[in-house]
Image (cartoon, rainbow, N blue to C red):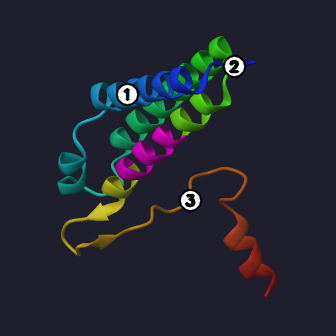
Amino acid sequence: MGLPRAQSVGVGLATMAGVWVIYQNSLPPVADIRTGANNDPDASAAEKRARWTSAAVVVGVSVLTGDATVFIMGGLAIILESWAHRHANAFDPTSRSIQVPPPRAGVFANLKVSAQAGA
């Protein structure tokens, strides 16, 4: 089951290129995100949309080919692109450091408050 090794790597590289194209068309360049305001919600939403679109493409190609190598290579491309854009969005150009955004409402938003209340 799956593709021969040479074809598997070729399709994996093509899938990685597809992920790169999705990120390049969905987001501004990393340098522009890095020099903008940190933790920009629009850049974060665009990165999330690119991540889900890329994941759909990677899973689709992996299922069609029945090859784990394609899935691994495509997933690695998603992780690298996502990290690069998230890191750039968290960078604060005024302090020249990474500023972690506060937690949003959700399951873990009250975790710190609950831990402090119990102490």
Residue at which label 1 appears = 17
Q: Report the side of 114 relative to 103 (left or right).
A: right
Residue at left 38%, top 34%?
46
Q: Quadrant of the N terminus?
A: top right
Q: The disc labelled 2 sits on which kind of residue?
A: Gly
SS class, disc 3: loop
Majority SS type along the magenta span: helix
Measure how far apart labels 2 and 1 are at the Cα level. 20 Å
Residue assigned mark 3: 103
Say which element carries label 2.
loop
Question: Which is more N-terminal, label 1 or label 2?
Answer: 2
Q: Which residues are magenta?
A: 76-85
* Residue 25, horizontal then vertical, whole percent: 29, 25
**CA distance for labels 3 and 2:** 42 Å
Q: Return the x and y of residue 76 as percentages of the image width and height.
A: 52, 42
91 shown above or below 52: below
* Front residue of 77 and 108: 77
Q: Which mark is residue 2?
A: 2
Q: Is residue 57 left or right of residue 29?
A: right
| Three-letter code for the amino acid on which mark 3 is drawn | Pro
